[in-house]
Amino acid sequence: MKRIILFISIAVVFATTSCEPTYEKEYSWAYPLAGDWVLNTYAPDKTGKDSITSDESFEIKIYNSSFGKDSIWIDDYATTSSNGHFWSMKFKVKADMSTKTFANTGIVVNAVNAYKIGIKLNNGKVVGNDSIRFEVQFQDDTTPYGKTYILAGRRINSYDDYMH
């Protein structure tokens, strides 16, 4: 009888410890805004609607800041002043996750090394889960902050892809 109890005990130990653990996906608190995005440039047409100005799309990455849950980084993969996908930009802006909006209240300084230009970003919003639109201006434009670039596009991997 003792051998049967010992055998059952050993079998239970092996059965409970040999199973692979299950992991739950963890998402960044910034996920409603964060992700990899493909964008195009737009300008308002005569009716005030966004009209595409370039068929050439480019990628940016948006990710959370490690300094708190109130800002995000916008990054077009630039490491120098001449190799970004759009404007060689990497900067932090304020974000509101409840409304999926983001903007800066003034001018932020570009974080790309040796390219410390000022950048303004307004009216940033994620619409639904996978569409994004924002307006940006740059200090080093022909007329500093003189042109507003409308950037809009879609998330590369959909929100649902990440959630399932």
Image: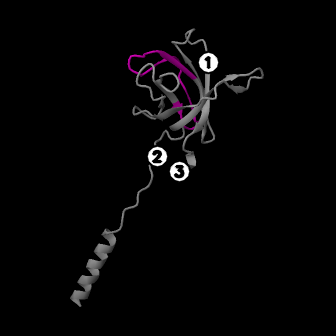
Q: Earlier in the sequence, mark 1 or mark 3?
A: 1
Label 3 with label 2: CB-CB less than 8 Å: yes
Q: Quadrant of the N terminus?
A: bottom left
Disc on res. 163: 3
The x, y position of residue 56, in whole percent, is: 60, 29
Q: Nearer the viewer, mark 1 or mark 2?
A: 1
Alpha carbon separation for disc pair 1 and 3: 34 Å
What residue is rendered at 44% in x and 49% in y?
26
The x, y position of residue 79, in whole percent, is: 40, 25
Q: Earlier in the sequence, mark 1 or mark 2?
A: 2
| Badge 3 amino acid | Met
Compared to residue 98, the image places residue 41 above or below, namely: above
What residue is rendered at 51% in x and 12% in y?
140
Q: Residues within 10 Å of mark 1 (few under 14, many from 20)?
A: some
Residue under circle 2?
A: 27
**Secondary structure beneath disc 1?**
loop
